[in-house]
Image (cartoon, rainbow, N blue to C red):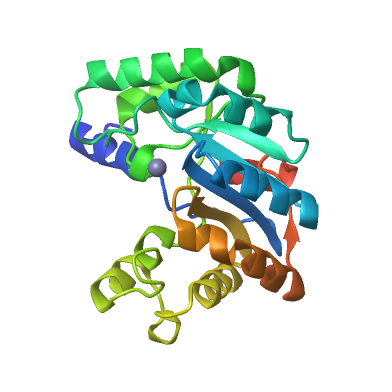
Amino acid sequence: MNQPVEAVRQRCRFESDIATPPPPGVVSLSFDDGPEPGATQAILALLDKHQIPASFFLIAAKAQRHPELAALVKAHPLALVGNHSWSHPNFHDIAPGRQASELERSDTTLAALEAPKLFRYPYGNSSCEANTQLQQLGYRIVGWHVDSCDWAFDKTGGIDAHEAKICGVDKANREHFVDHVVTAVKARKGGIVLMHEIHPNTLAQLDALIQRLLAEGFRFAPLTDAGFQPSLR
Ligand SMILES: [Zn+2]
């Protein structure tokens, strides 16, 4: 157990891509970077339409600016509120003191909205210090099995070769967001899917994506589902 400090530090850093398999055939949708006027309501309406659950990892400063939207998510029976930090910094680029204040401030701001307490790092970039603090605050850390790469598709509806490589998007799917996500979900046999409220292309294609996943036989479950617990940290 006497591992070099640097090796331990490295292990604390990348916890975003979940290696643990999801419950087979079960998908959990997650939307980061909200609440976003218009988008939050549109996503909640789709949850109603299809009667499926989802998680919303809110930027606490935005939740404070839009308390009515945060309250809508909290009140929705199919939605869970998660914590996505106070101001969305890259935790690899800020000192431990600022990491601590990001967590404290977001925890205080979102406390009344969270049950259970779920945290997702901006960019998935974690640190040992923050992991420890999150555990002390009672959070589970949530990564993803499937990166929709919706930020890249959002620019033109397609994705260029460089981005496709970063995101693991098959060549055939570079112009097809829904096909990419369905392919990736099938490859993982379900899983937690990372998306963002703030990208119009995501919202425009979300209904079609949900319909395709249902047609492919996937079931939707919240992050509180017992089958997802081994995938949380
Ligand atoms: Zn984010």
Q: Is residue 204 left or right of residue 208?
A: left
**Residue 76: x %, y % from top left:** 74, 35
Q: Quadrant of residue 98?
A: top left
Q: Residue at x 23, y 36 (%)?
A: 92
**Residue 218: x %, y % from top left:** 73, 66
Q: Where is 10 relative to 46, above or below?
A: above
Quadrant of the rendered image holding ligand 1: top left
Q: Which residue is drawn at 62% across and 15% down?
A: 112
Q: Is residue 46 left or right of residue 21?
A: right
Decide if residue 122 is in sight here. Answer: yes
Q: Where is 104 relative to 63, above or below?
A: above
Q: In this view, does 89 lie to the left or right of 136?
A: left
Q: In which quarter of the image is the N terminus?
A: top left
Give the residue at the far front of this rendering: 38
Decide if residue 147 is in sight here. Answer: no
Q: In which quarter of the image is residue 187?
A: bottom right
Residue in the foreground of this view, choosing between 68 and 21: 68
Label total for image: 0
**Residue 219: x %, y % from top left:** 76, 61
Q: Residue at x 55, y 47 (%)?
A: 39
Q: In this view, does 126 lie to the left or right of 226?
A: left
**Residue 40: x %, y % from top left:** 58, 42
Residue in the foreground of this view, choosing between 40 and 222: 40
Q: Where is 130 relative to 223, above or below?
A: above
Give the residue at the far bottom of this rendering: 172
